[in-house]
Image: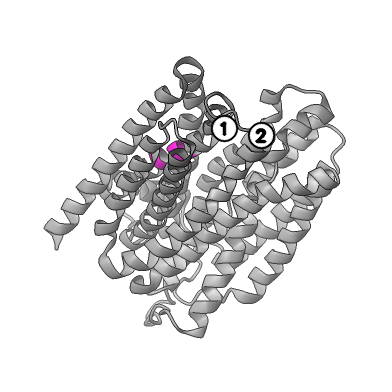
């Protein structure tokens, strides 16, 4: 019986070099290159979200149909992550990530000049597929190249790039479209991400602890099944789907509550809730180094508890408490995502790219499934129903975190 393929860290018979540690020049280059890569990925993925009303008017379509400009990208990205699993062990890590960034940037630029909505959706779908080549590989690359005691900080910087990219993609495109047009906004985002891709290529060192190798598809599938049978990884995958689904649901539907009595906020003010992503950057920066120092098993459940407390505060009739609750929820979510994603790479001793791809697959499927169903609950039961549903999701995430903590303590 053939053995499962493993991530090959060095040529046969050679001793793999030590992982990169914090404070070295190579560590700085890796961390900042990943920041730019994460920024470019999520700026492109979400740049259409704030433009949906303009797309609906320009193409004379319904708001629901206009949302395909975003969902087409996220759905193909989730599916593309599974394709990435099949390619990850046979292609250079850096080469695959560079191809993803350059091709997606060009597709974003092209999408600014599409004449019809159907062609726009087709290009957005291709863009999501292209973007899938970076996230799972980025997490695997960091887990391989960076020493485990320094991994939390580098993963935190990468996820901070994701957060800032998502925020700038949403807010920046809206501001540019207000001054010029949606086409100019998308083109500027595409060109900016192309320039970041150049910086990514220049700054990211080639892998030293991974050697590409061809593996049969059947072996990769068998390896993925092994990950899905691992209780710790399965718990982290469930955690990813529930947490991301909760996060997307809050940011999708809280605006409906804020525009209604007793708040009655205008849309321009409600749009500023995306600035709360900056709190998420703080969560990643703080949670990453703390998890390196205190242990992931001690940090994860605390961050989920913070997110749950923040969610419950959004039930308040006082705007200040709602904003404070949203800040706490955002901090807890992004901090928890930083800790959980780095834990996947640390726990998976082999097939790290496959393990990371599965984590992100559950992450985006949670966004799609729970995020969509929450809209049904919002329509029928209002914000109280949304909070009740998401509280259950967060309580399950908390139970998973505590179970992993207990397992870690018994193992220690």
| Residue located at (30% from left, 53% from top) | 300
Residue closer to the observer: 291 or 226? 291
| Residue located at (43% from left, 52% from top) | 331
The answer to the question of whether label 2 and label 1 lie on touching residues, with beta carbons closer than 8 A, is yes
Q: What element carries label 2?
A: helix
- Which residue is at the far top? 380
Within-10-Å neighbours for mark 2: few <14, some 14–19, many 20+: few
Residue 111 placement (x, y as % from top left): 79, 44
Q: Quick check: can you spot residue 149?
A: yes
Q: Is mark 1 on a helix, strand or loop?
A: helix
Q: Give the range drawn in magenta.
A: 242-247
Depicted 195 relative to depicted 205: above or below: above
Looking at the image, residue 301 sits to the left or right of residue 139; the answer is left
| Cα distance in 3D space between marks 2 and 1 | 8 Å
| Residue located at (61% from left, 51% from top) | 167
Most frequent secondary structure within the magenta stretch:
helix
Q: Quick check: can you spot residue 6?
A: no
Residue closer to the observer: 266 or 404? 266
Reading the image, the residue beneath label 2 is 267
Residue 117 placement (x, y as % from top left): 79, 31
Looking at the image, residue 316 sits to the left or right of residue 25; the answer is left
Depicted 4 relative to depicted 293: above or below: above
Residue 32 placement (x, y as % from top left): 56, 71
| Residue located at (46% from left, 43% from top) | 326
Residue closer to the observer: 284 or 115? 284
Reading the image, the residue beneath label 1 is 255
| Magenta stretch contains residue 298 | no
Looking at the image, residue 220 sits to the left or right of residue 266; the answer is left
């Amino acid at each position: 019986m053939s053995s499962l393929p493993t991530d090959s860290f060095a040529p046969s018979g050679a001793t793999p070099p030590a992982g990169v540690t914090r404070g070295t020049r190579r560590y700085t280059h890796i961390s900042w290159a990943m920041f730019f890569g994460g920024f470019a990925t999520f700026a492109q993925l979400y740049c259409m979200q704030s433009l949906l009303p303009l797309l609906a008017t320009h193409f004379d379509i319904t708001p629901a149909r206009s949302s395909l400009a975003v969902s087409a990208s996220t759905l193909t990205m989730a599916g593309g992550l599974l394709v990435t699993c099949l390619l990850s062990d046979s292609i250079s890590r850096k080469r695959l990530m560079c191809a993803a960034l350059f091709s997606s940037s060009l597709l974003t630029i092209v999408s600014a000049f599409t004449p019809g909505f159907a062609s726009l959706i087709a290009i957005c779908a291709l863009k999501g597929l292209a973007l899938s080549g970076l996230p799972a590989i980025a997490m695997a690359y960091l887990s391989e190249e960076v020493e485990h005691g320094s991994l939390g900080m580098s993963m935190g910087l990468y996820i901070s790039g994701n957060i800032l990219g998502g925020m700038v993609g949403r807010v920046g495109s809206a501001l540019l479209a207000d001054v010029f047009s949606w086409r100019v906004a998308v083109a500027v985002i595409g060109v900016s991400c192309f320039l970041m891709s150049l910086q990514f290529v220049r700054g990211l060192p080639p892998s030293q602890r991974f050697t590409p190798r061809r593996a049969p598809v059947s072996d990769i599938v068998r390896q993925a099944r092994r990950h899905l049978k691992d209780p710790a990884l399965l718990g982290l995958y469930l955690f990813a789907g529930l947490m991301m689904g909760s996060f997307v649901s809050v940011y999708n539907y809280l605006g409906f509550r804020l525009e209604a009595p007793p708040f009655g906020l205008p849309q321009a003010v409600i749009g500023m809730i995306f600035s709360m992503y900056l709190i998420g950057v703080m969560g990643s920066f703080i949670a990453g180094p703390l998890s390196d120092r205190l242990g992931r098993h001690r940090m994860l459940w605390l961050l989920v508890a913070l997110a749950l407390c923040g969610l419950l505060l959004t039930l308040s009739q006082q705007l200040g408490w709602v904003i404070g609750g949203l800040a706490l929820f955002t901090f807890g979510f992004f901090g928890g995502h930083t800790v959980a994603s780095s834990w996947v790479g640390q726990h998976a001793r082999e097939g790290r790219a496959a393990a990371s791809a599965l984590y992100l697959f559950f992450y985006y499927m949670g966004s799609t499934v729970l995020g969509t169903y929450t809209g049904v609950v919002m329509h029928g039961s209002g914000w109280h129903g949304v909070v009740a549903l998401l509280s259950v999701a967060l309580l399950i995430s908390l139970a998973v975190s505590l179970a992993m903590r207990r397992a870690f303590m018994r193992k220690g």
